[in-house]
Image (cartoon, rainbow, N blue to C red):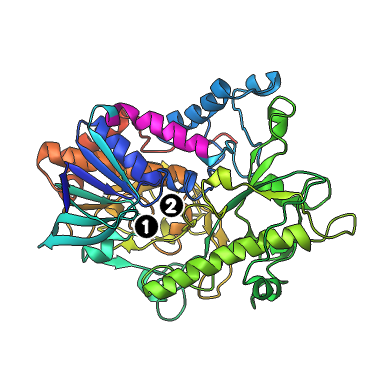
Amino acid sequence: MHKHSADIIIIGGGTGGSAAALAAAKSGKTVILTEETDWIGGQLTSQAVPPDEHPWIEKFGCTRAYRQFRNGVRDYYRRHFPLTAEARSQIYLNPGNGGVSRLCHEPRAAVAVLQDMLAPYIHSGRLQILYRHRIKSALVEGDNIRKVIMTNLITGELVELSAAYFLDATECGDVLPLAGAEYVTGAEAFSETGEPHAVAGEALPQDMQGFTYCFAMDYIEGEDHTIERPERYDFWRQYKADFWPDRLLSWTGVRPHTLEAVDYELFEGTERYSLFYYRRIIDSTNFEKGFYPGSITLVNWPQNDYWLGSVIDVSEQERERNLWDAKQLSLSLLYWLQTEAPRPDRGHGYPGLRLRKDIVGTDDGLAMYPYIRESRRIKAEFTVLEQHVSAACRPEGRAVQFDDSVGIGCYRIDLHPSTGNRHYIDISSLPFQIPLGSLIPVRMNNLLPACKNLGVTHITNGCYRLHPVEWNIGEAAGFLASYCLDRKLIPRDVRNTESELRKFQQNLVNHGIELTWPTIHPV
C-alpha cells in the first residue's frame, strides 16, 4: 500500500475542493487533493454545468479567487481562439451567449484555467493531485480522523493518506458515513426545522433532488448523427410522472416558481423559449466564420432530470442501476430529439444534432460525473434554515445577518423534482451569508465540509449549492484548516472565541473574501 501524508487532505476535486486546495496551498500548507474523475472542477467541468450565478456577479458578490477564475476563462478564449473583433472587444465576453449565465463556456476551458491557478503549488511540490481515486474507508480515533484509505480506480491499488485536517469535498458527502460523522439526508420534517416548505409529516431521508447526466451537442444542418436507439428508450418515450403535465420526453415542461405548464422549442425563432439557447456554451458567431461548424449547447434540461432513485445511502447495486438508468434517460432524450421531436415546420426530429463526446471527455458522450444537486449534509453547530434567507420569511427585505460570516452568496431557493415524486420548490431568497457555524460538525474536530455538504437543510441547499457559493465554501474551509494549524486550534474554538473569530475573518477579507453584501444592490 502506498502511503502519503500532508498538512491537509481534501477528498473530492470539484468546485469546492479545487477552491479549498488553492486556499490551503496559498497559506503555505502541504495539500493532497483527490478526485474520482480525470478532471478537477466538478460542476464546472466533470459535471458539465455552466455557472449559475446572481445578477451582480460581474461587480461584487463572490471571492477574489472566483473572480480570477472567471476572468481566466475569458482570457483563455481571448488568447487562444479566433474571436471576431466584436466579441474580442466585449469586456464581459460570454463565449456561449447562453441564457443561464453571463459566462457560458466549455468544460475544458474551465479545466485549463483551474490547472493554471493551481500550477504554482503543484510545481513547487506543495500540492499533489491524485486523479481517479475514491475513498474506501477512514480510520477514526475518538473525534478525529487519522487516516483515509483511497482506491486507485485504474489499478485497484490502495493508498493511505494521513493529515492533521480532512476536508470532505465529495459530491455526495462520502467521507461523512465512513468517518462516523453525524449527517442528514433528504427532506427534514416541519416539526424539526419549522420551515414553511418542509414536509408536513415525518422526515424523508431518501427524498432528494433528482440528478442529471449532462451532455454536449451541436447541430450540423443536412447531416445525420443519430445515435443507436437506447436500450430503455421505449420506457422513457412513454414515461409521465403524476405531477408532470405531459410525457417527460416532450416540449412541455413546468415553470418552477408557478408550476404552470410551459412549452419549449429547440432553437430560437419562435415564441417559445429555446432550450438550445438556455445552456449554449459556444455561440459560433463569436468566432471567425467556419471555425465552429455549429454552436454547442449543454443539455441539462427538465427532460433529463432523473428522479426515480437516489445514489446516496442505497446499496451499490441500486446506486449503479440508478446511474445507468439516468444515462439511459439522457441518451433517450437525445435520440428523441434526433428522431421524433416535433419541429415548427410540422416535421419530426433533428438528425443533425451531434453528440459531442470530446466536449465532456468520455466515450459515451455523457459527463464524467452526474450533476448532483443534493449531498449528505453535516449536522452542524449551526444550520441555515428557510426562515433565515427566504424573502417571504424576511419582510424587512434582508436575510439574517450572521456575526460569524465567512462569505456570501445569492440564488433562488431552487429545488428540482425529487426522488419522492415531489414537484419543484422554487421560491425567492435574499442575498445571504455563509455562517462559520454551518462549516463545523457537531462533534468531529478535524473534519470540515468543503462544498454543498455544509449545515443547510433540504430547502436551503437549494440556494447554497450553486457554483460561486460552493467555491466560497471550499475556499473558507481551506483557509480555516490552515488557520487552525497555525494557531493550534480546532474550528469550533475559532468560532466561539471572539478574538480568534475576528482574526480569522480579517484573514478571509485579506484574501478577497467578501463577508457582507452592500447595503444597496444595483439592478
User: Where in the figure is residue 284, as x and y percent of width and height?
Assistant: 70, 33
Residues 181 and 510: in front is 181
Q: Which amino acid does label 2 sit on?
A: Tyr
Residues 504 and 1: in front is 1
Residue hosting label 1 = 384
Tell me the crowding category of disc 1: few under 14, some 14 to 19, or many 20 or more residues within 10 angstroms, Cα based.
Answer: many
Residue hosting label 2 = 464
Q: Where does the magenta region start and end?
A: 108-122
Q: What residue lies at 20% left-to-right and 56% top-to-bottom?
A: 148
User: Where in the figure is residue 521, as x and y percent of width and height?
Assistant: 53, 36
**Mark 1 or mark 2: which is in front?**
2
- Describe the element under mark 2 as helix, strand or loop: helix
Give the position of the N terminus as an image quadrant: bottom left
Would you say the magenta stretch is mainly helix, strand or loop?
helix
Q: Locate residue 494 relative to residue 273 in the image: left or right.
A: left
Q: Are marks 1 and 2 in contact (CB under 8 Å)?
A: yes
Q: Locate residue 144 relative to residue 137 in the image: left or right.
A: left
Q: What residue lies at 16% left-to-right and 38% top-to-bottom?
A: 499
Report, in whole angstroms, how far the alpha carbon at label 1 lies from the one at label 2: 10 Å
Q: What residue type is labelled 1?
A: Val
Which image quadrant is residue 455 in? bottom left
Q: Please, is residue 180 above or below residue 502 in the view? A: below
Residues 91 and 393: in front is 91
**Magenta segment includes 450:** no
